[in-house]
Image (spheres, rainbow, N blue to C red):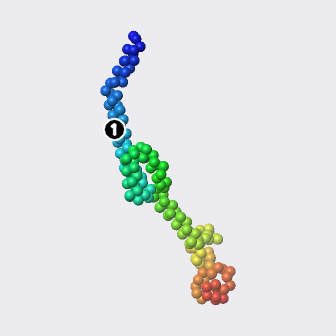
Amino acid sequence: MDILGYIEDIQNFFRLPIWRWLIYGIVFILIIIWLAFVYWTYRDARLRNTSPTAAIFWALVVLAFSYPGLVVYLILRPPEFIDDIVERDLEISRMEALLDSKVSNCPACGKEVHDDFLICPYCRKKLKNQCISCGRPLDLDWKVCPYCKTTQ
Ligand SMILES: [Zn+2]
Ligand SMILES: [Zn+2]
């Protein structure tokens, strides 16, 4: 068996129609995935608080430039999901509300009580005096009401 015949065998093997169909198949799959990425880009951009116009723009970029366009989008897209932003803002306002409401702990039972409570609703410990004139809550050792100047 001469070497030229051997090379010819290999060449004939790669000329078989199955190779062409295999390449067509791969190209077909790549096109399907590419089109799916066009849709995915639009949806991803919308979830990231991008305007509809910008989302369509990015989808068109991926449609026009295919995979290189997708890479550019992945680099330039906004880093946060809109849901994450909403969640973080909620968390911040919850913390602010907690700081604003002036909550402290009952010295007797340790449960949370508001600063204007007169007695602890859990253990009935007296927390504040009530001003004899205006009725506002006063610390137990205050001699005069700071709101209405009435001596207690
Ligand atoms: Zn208590
Ligand atoms: Zn008073």
Looking at the image, which residue is at 53% across and 64% down?
Answer: 92
Looking at the image, which residue is at 35% across and 41% down?
Answer: 31
Query: Is residue 74 found left or right of 105 in the rendered image?
Result: left
How dense is the environment of label 1, judged by Cα within 10 Å: few (below 14), some, or many (20 and up)?
few
Query: Is residue 41 found left or right of 128 in the rendered image?
Result: left
Please state, as top left, top right, bottom left or bottom right, where the N terminus lies in the image: top left
Q: Give 125 or 136, whichever is nearer the viewer.
A: 136
Residue 107 sits above or below residue 73 on the image: below
Residue 105 screen position, x and y as percent: 61, 69
Query: Is residue 137 found left or right of 26 in the rendered image?
Result: right
Task: Give, as a three-letter code, the residue at label 1.
Answer: Phe
Most extreme residue toward the top is: 1
Looking at the image, which residue is at 39% across and 54% down?
Answer: 57
Q: Which residue is mark 1?
A: 28
Residue 38 screen position, x and y as percent: 37, 48
Query: Is residue 74 found left or right of 39 in the rendered image?
Result: right
Residue 43 visible in the shown view: no
Residue 93 visible in the shown view: yes
Looking at the image, which residue is at 39% across and 18% down?
Answer: 7
Using the rendered view, name the quadrant where residue 56 is placed: bottom left
Please state, as top left, top right, bottom left or bottom right, where the C terminus lies in the image: bottom right
Q: Give 4 or 117, whichever is nearer the viewer.
A: 4
Mark 1: secondary structure: helix
Residue 133 sits above or below residue 42 on the image: below
Residue 113 screen position, x and y as percent: 58, 72
Q: Give 8 or 131, whichever is nearer the viewer.
A: 8
